[in-house]
Image (cartoon, grey):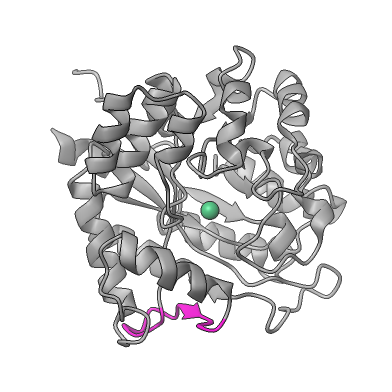
């Protein structure tokens, strides 16, 4: 039997939509997301300028992302759903707290249509039917669960969530959890940005990927990269991703992620459609001028992120590691497609 091909996967790509195709996606157009999207996304990433007003964002976004993946060196991207925040005592949804919503069934359906999309659901453990819903979605193909504990209002160390985490661990579903400050979405509980809250899921045996490696995204944010480094020594099931490292503040922490105690647990993630720039890498001395020009010429943000991460010194393993952490069998279709 031939050895399966190694799969190059971006583990952190957001889905965005306006519900125009019946997807159920919601996007509050007056919030910060709108500003981010209109200012950067539509202009920089090649969508029509009126993509947000044209009533066709669902289709435009999927078509565009499909093209970017096909024209990149990636074999697949993990596409992220986005749950609503919930009240942790009552299990009721917190209305008007989320700026955007992407239903779990939408990413599952997209993955059925496009095998290079790997669906990450977003499922709050306080939801009344959380475990049953988790089982249903995993049976339908979910490969990961993505949460922003500070924005979704999830205390991952809450003992009530242990059965949920244990079920995730049994089904080999990793948790991709935002760590550090957040400036695009409303923050409900700032404390939960601290990666130490993730020990509840880690102790239950869940493979946890600390998105952004605990680095700071704003000037006044706290940096948790040293905390993460300590935690990595204690938890063999803890990983980090290098998503959004081509932004001004996070790029500063690249050296910490290349530390020999950390680099073996780093996964490649872009955080698309968060816009990236090669300037920060150049200013921090990571790029030879020729690489800067190569990256600047590259109009595909997914590929540009790969060029820049390589130039920063992230080893090849980081681009292939996530494939080993996903549930068994979840990459079979993709393997078949690549041969
Ligand atoms: Zn993200």
- Asked if residue 146 is positioned above or below residue 37 in the image, the reply reads above
- Is residue 49 visible from the viewing direction of this image? yes
Q: Quadrant location of residue 2?
A: top left
Residue 153 in magenta?
no
Above or below for 286 versus 211? above
The percent coordinates of residue 40 (x first, y second) are 41, 63
Q: Considering the whole magenta stretch, tell me its main secondary structure.
A: loop
Whether residue 98 sits left or right of residue 17 in the image: it is right
**Residue 20 or residue 339, whichever sits in front:** 20
Q: In the depicted view, which residue is nearer to us: 89 or 321?
A: 321
Image coordinates of residue 338 in percent, x first then y, are 17, 36
Q: Quadrant of residue 45?
A: bottom left
Vertical arrangement, residue 97 with respect to residue 53, above or below: above
Residue drawn 77% across the image and 35% down it: 203
Rendered-image quadrant of the C terminus: top left
The spot of residue 223 in percent (x, y) is 74, 38
Total of numbered circles in the picture? 0
Q: Any magenta on residue 20?
A: yes
Coordinates of residue 77 in the picture (x, y in percent): 35, 47
Q: Name the residue at the left extreme.
A: 339
The span picked out in magenta is 18-30
| Residue 239 makes an appearance in the image | no
User: In this image, 87 relative to 79: left or right?
Assistant: right
């Amino acid at each position: 039997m031939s050895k399966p091909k190694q799969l190059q996967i971006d583990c952190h790509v957001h889905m965005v939509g306006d519900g125009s195709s019946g997807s159920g996606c919601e996007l509050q157009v007056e919030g910060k997301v709108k500003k981010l999207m209109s200012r950067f996304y539509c202009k920089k990433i090649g969508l029509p300028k009126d993509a947000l007003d044209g009533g066709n964002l669902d289709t435009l976004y999927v078509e565009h992302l499909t093209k970017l993946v096909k024209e990149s060196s990636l074999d697949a991207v993990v596409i992220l759903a986005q749950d609503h925040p919930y009240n942790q005592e009552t299990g009721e949804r917190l209305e008007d707290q989320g700026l955007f919503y992407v239903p779990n069934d939408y990413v599952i359906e997209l993955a059925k249509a496009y095998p290079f999309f790997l669906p990450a659901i977003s499922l709050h453990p306080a939801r009344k039917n959380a475990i049953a819903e988790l089982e249903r979605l995993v049976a339908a193909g979910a490969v990961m669960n993505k949460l922003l504990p500070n924005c979704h209002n999830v205390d991952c160390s809450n003992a009530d969530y242990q059965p949920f985490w244990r079920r995730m661990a049994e089904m080999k579903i990793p948790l991709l959890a935002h760590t550090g400050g957040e400036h695009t979405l409303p923050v409900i509980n700032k404390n939960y940005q601290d990666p130490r809250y993730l020990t509840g899921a880690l102790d239950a045996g869940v493979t946890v990927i600390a998105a952004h490696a605990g680095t700071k995204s704003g000037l006044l944010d706290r940096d948790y990269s040293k905390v993460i480094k300590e935690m990595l020594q204690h938890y063999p099931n803890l990983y980090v991703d290098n998503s959004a490292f081509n932004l001004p503040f996070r790029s500063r922490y690249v050296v910490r992620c290349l530390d020999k105690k950390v680099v073996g647990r780093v996964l490649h993630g872009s955080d698309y459609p968060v816009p990236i720039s090669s300037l920060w890498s150049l200013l921090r001395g990571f790029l030879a001028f020729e690489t800067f020009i190569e990256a600047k010429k590259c109009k595909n943000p997914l590929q540009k992120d790969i060029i820049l991460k390589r130039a920063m010194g992230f080893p090849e393993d980081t681009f292939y590691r996530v494939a080993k952490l996903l549930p068994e069998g979840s990459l079979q279709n993709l393997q078949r497609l690549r041969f």
